[in-house]
Image: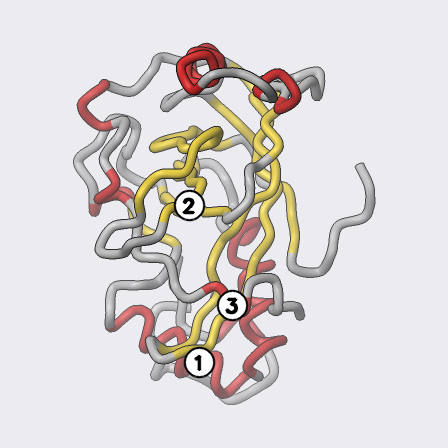
Amino acid sequence: MGQLAENEFITPPVRLHFPALFKKAPVPDSDKETFQATMIIPQDVDMEAFLGPWKKVLVGRFGRETAKKVIKQLKAKGRFPIHDSAEKDYDGYEEGTHYINASANYPPLVIDQKKRPILDANKLVGKTEDERDELIAEAERRIYAGCWVRLHINLYAWDNKWGKGVSFGFKTVQLVKKAEPFSVATQNNTDAFDEIEDDDDLDEGLDDLTGDEVDDLDGDDDEDDLGLGI
């Protein structure tokens, strides 16, 4: 794999939920549509694999002191991007796991274990809508809610009328292994997703946070006192 940008990383294996990988899906309380994926992070995964890159983008974009305030505001509004799975009553959201919603404005590359495209976009060219839907449905039977995947994440900072923050985008999804599909009742529920911030700032974030009380800071330069407690 080529060198990743500072705002990018490859996840460890996670379980996929609410996938919209081949066609955009609506964003709740918005007129937008995006490609979407929820990552369910197993209990045995060190959350620093996700927090570390997120922290780096946040601090790099806003500076350390503002980053502390942003975390506090995101938590107060229930908009912190890494969630305790206990918040949801869905298949796979087990005690001790976490989940993250990721989105993309452009079609992600979706590949199998051998790095072969699960759906070759060239095969969609010249097809009728029904034919395209059939090819997409076939691909969705191969990579589905419940299977294990890895994602190529690109983090992006935003600063707009809703506030400041850093969100999870994604460029590639790789199938790792099959698993029991999640129940149909939970597979297309857009309530799992937060509203996407204005992404005019997409990919602007560059430049790495953990602890539970934001107010309980020691004032040094250690980035592990920024009030995350995950």
| Residue under pointer 1 | 68
Q: Quadrant of the C terminus?
A: bottom left
Residue 132 is labelled as none
Q: Quadrant of the N terminus?
A: top right
Contact check, label 3 and label 2, Cβ < 8 Å: no
Residue 84 lies, with reference to residue 120, above or below; the image says below
- Closer to the camera, 225 or 190? 190
| Residue under pointer 2 | 34
Image spot of residue 168 (x, y percent): 49, 53
Residue 172 lies, with reference to residue 53, above or below; the image says above
Q: Is residue 108 left or right of residue 79?
A: right
Amino acid on which the number 1 mark rests in the picture: Lys
| Mark 2 / mark 1, whichever is N-terminal | 2
- The quarter holding residue 26 reads top left
Residue 142 seen from this side: no
Q: Is residue 122 left or right of residue 151?
A: right
Amino acid on which the number 2 mark rests in the picture: Thr
Give the number of the mark in front: 2 or 1.
2
- Closer to the camera, 15 or 158? 158
- Closer to the camera, 37 or 85? 37
Residue at 58% across / 40% down in the picture?
11
> What colouring method underlies this structural image?
secondary structure
| Residue under pointer 3 | 200
Q: Is residue 206 left or right of residue 129?
A: right
